[in-house]
Amino acid sequence: MNKTHYHPLSIGLHWLMFILFVIALAAIEIRGYVPKDTGAEFRAQLREWHLAAGLLIFLLVWIRVGVKVRFGAPRVLGDSALQVKAAYALHGLLYLVMILLPLSGVIFTQAGGREVGVFGMVLPTLIGPNPELKTVVKEFHELMGNAVYFLVGIHVLAALWHHFALKDDTMKRMRFKQD
Ligand code: HEM
Ligand code: HEM
């Protein structure tokens, strides 16, 4: 397989999921600044946005994997084998994040005895109340949630490095309109 282009669905899902990450992270960060007593309603709304964006990421990641398996993807470009391997490893980690973060979010919320409800819909209960499990999985979620900034930060810097320093097609092939 020697592809030169991403399937348009892969490109669309990449950028749609980028927006969903921004919504999930912005909602939970802003929530941290809203006072618990006077801003309870706004805090609940932000939580709902966080959950909705996170659950959508979980739904879409399987379609994204399916499209990649079915239609393939171009090889990562790079000037050394090590750099190319690092890029694949980082992409793999980003896929893990897209699966494990929402999953852990659902598990710790339900283990904490709360419903996972978004815009009037409630997810079936998969796990009953379990305070110990809640603590461990919540810590994992927060750790991984914060690691996302770091992982996506490296990913974006690498993309910029390809574009401006190596001057290769990495950035161009994630655009919808290609020359
Ligand atoms: C890829 C999607 C997701 C990302 C990137 C993400 C990321 C984060 C981050 C960065 C935090 C703040 C951690 C901190 O306070 O240090 C957080 C908290 C939280 N997440 Fe997620 N999350 C995602 C999906 C979900 C889902 C699907 C759920 C629930 C179904 C969920 C439930 C929560 C809750 C309830 C908190 C607040 C914890 C608290 O402060 O009490 N998250 N998440
Ligand atoms: C401003 C933000 C972002 C930029 C500029 C960006 C840029 C890019 C570029 C240029 C590629 C193509 C790499 C190649 O062909 O070798 C790519 C691929 C990829 N990006 Fe991003 N990205 C961003 C955000 C994100 C986010 C938030 C995620 C998910 C957590 C993500 C996950 C991936 C993955 C997994 C790939 C591998 C190709 C695939 O399987 O879709 N990116 N990105």
Image (spheres, helix red, strand yellow):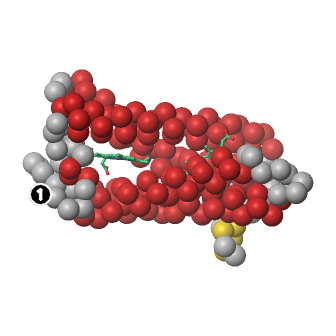
Q: Going by the picture, which residue comes out furthest to the front?
A: 164
Residue marked by disc 1: 179
In screen coordinates, is 93 left or right of 27?
A: left
Amino acid under disc 1: Asp
Residue found at x 58% / y 37%: 146
Most distant residue in the right direction: 37
For the residue pair 176 and 91, the one nearer the viewer reads as 176
Is 108 positioned to the left or the right of 161 in the image? Answer: right
Q: Quadrant of residue 170?
A: top left
Tell which of 168 and 117 is nearer to you. Answer: 168
Q: Quadrant of residue 118?
A: bottom right
Please report the residue visible at 16 percent of the width from the left and 58 percent of the height from the top: 178
Can residue 62 be seen at all in this image of the molecule?
no
Q: Where does residue 3 sit, x and y in percent of width and height?
A: 12, 51
> Is residue 54 in view from this perspective?
yes
Q: Quadrant of the C terminus?
A: bottom left
Residue 136: image location, x then y, percent: 70, 37
* Residue in front for this viewpoint, 28 or 94: 28
**Left or right of 12, for residue 33:** right
Residue at (26% x, 52% y) in the render: 174
